[in-house]
Amino acid sequence: MDTFSLRSFALLATVAFACIAWLSIPARRRTDFYDHIGALVWFALITEAVGLFLCMIREDNGLVYSVYTVIEFLIILSLSASIRPGLRMAAVVAGTVGCVGLFADVFFGRDQQHIANLGIIITSCISTVFLLLVLWHLAETSERSIWKDPRTLACLGLLVSYATVAP
């Protein structure tokens, strides 16, 4: 087994562990926020499993990751709007712009086999702005230390992930 396969299986195991951790959250505590996080990790698991399978049979898996990028982007916008309801209309507009950018990059930028790099950068920039707005909202409205709010830590982690895509 080569290094690439080992890394791929390790990534798949890590995402599977995240799914197991999400399942361990009691159903009564699974708020809308946790449902969004669950959707992210389950879609990531499916994407990584399909991507690894396609790679193992020597098929290009770029389109799978581009589709995941669309789903992930829309979940992040929905998460943002659920935490800060005033962002709902902006999320619809941003979702449209991001999806058009992704689809244009996949279908017009090059053949449909490759990852939509420009589209990913566009959606990452939009996601970064929305996550900053959510974090600002949490800081302004929190009645307790924001560091004790799991939404803050999750949004900060997502912010770091998305903010570092463009550079």
Image (cartoon, grey):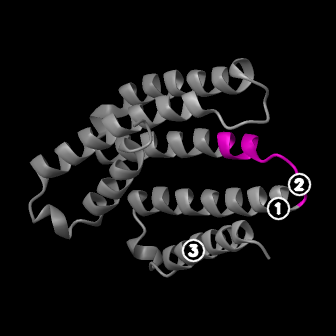
Residue visible at 71% across and 66% down in the picture? 4
Counting from the top left corner in percent of width and height, residue 56 is at: 85, 62
Q: Quadrant of the C terminus?
A: top left
Alpha carbon distance from label 1 to label 2: 9 Å
Residue visible at 30% across and 60% down in the picture? 151
Alpha carbon distance from label 2 to label 3: 23 Å
At mark 1, the secondary structure is helix
Q: Quadrant of the N terminus?
A: bottom right
First in residue order: circle 1 vs circle 2: 1
Is residue 120 shown above or below 93? Answer: below
Q: Amino acid at mark 3?
A: Thr
Q: Tell us which disc is closer to us: 1 or 2.
A: 2
Residue annotated with mark 2 = 58
Q: Is residue 129 magenta?
A: no
Is residue 136 shown above or below 20? Answer: above
Q: Amino acid at mark 2?
A: Arg
Residue visible at 34% across and 51% down in the picture? 160
Is residue 83 shown above or below 92? Answer: below
Q: Are marks 1 and 3 in contact (CB under 8 Å)?
A: no
